[in-house]
Amino acid sequence: MVRKWLVAALVAGSVSVGLSAHAERAPEFRLPGSTGDITLSQYQGKVVMVDFWASWCGPCRESFQWMNAMLDKYADKGLAIVAINLDQSRQDADDFLARNPAKFDIAFDSEGRTPEQYGVQGMPSAFLIDAQGHSMTGHAGFHKARVTDYENDIRKALGIDALTSPQKP
């Protein structure tokens, strides 16, 4: 079965997706995780990056490394990350995680209901949710050339001054 979020899985560039900035509460979810159910509301009071990924997604491998680094850097400032796997096979997800360990929480949505609630348009897709549970920003795709922009979105959500972009020669 081809889901509508899968049709756009190969996004050529990062684009804003899904929820509009501060206009609405982010959709709640309750999904099985590695150590029990995971809900968005359990992170109330934290800035949460909700990331959608699949084992077949090449850019997801790079985004996992980056998200681990962001969690190392900003967890003590209030950042949490929940990566929601969309594989129909849990074994595919587990194999990916064995090769690409995550320091953040992993949830599993093999039925693909959550990406529809968030308006996912490609893999990976990430959404920042503020400490009060409101949507802030989102992007589809993961591109190393945009990591400063992604990090600045996190910093803004945490109330930290933006990084300056490196000057291009």
Image: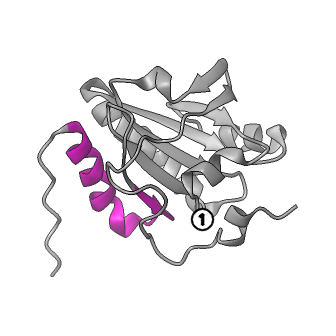
Return the x and y of residue 101 as percentages of the image width and height.
59, 36
Determine which residue is flagged by label 1: 122
Q: Please indicate, yes or no, whether residue 118 appears anywhere in the rendered image.
A: yes
Q: What is the basis of the colouring in this image?
A: one colour
Q: Quadrant of the C terminus?
A: bottom left
* Relative depth, front residue between 76 and 16: 16
Q: Tell me where residue 5 sits by quadrant.
A: bottom right
- Relative height, residue 161 to residue 148 (above, below): above
Q: Tell me where residue 33 sits by quadrant.
A: top right
Q: Quadrant of the N terminus?
A: bottom right
In the drawing, does residue 166 fall left or right of residue 123?
left
What's the magenta region?
138-158
Residue at the image point whose x is 63% and y is 73% from the top: 10
Residue at the image point whose x is 32% and y is 48% from the top: 22
Return the x and y of residue 150 as percentages of the image width and height.
33, 56
Residue at the image point whose x is 42% and y is 56% from the top: 138
- Relative height, residue 133 to residue 41 (above, below): below
Residue at the image point whose x is 28% and y is 24% from the top: 76
At label 1, the amino acid type is Gly
Question: Which element carries disc 1, helix, strand or loop?
Answer: loop
Return the x and y of residue 129 as percentages of the image width and height.
39, 41
Asked whether 114 falls inside the magenta stretch, the response is no
Asked whether 156 falls inside the magenta stretch, the response is yes
In the drawing, does residue 145 fall left or right of residue 112?
left
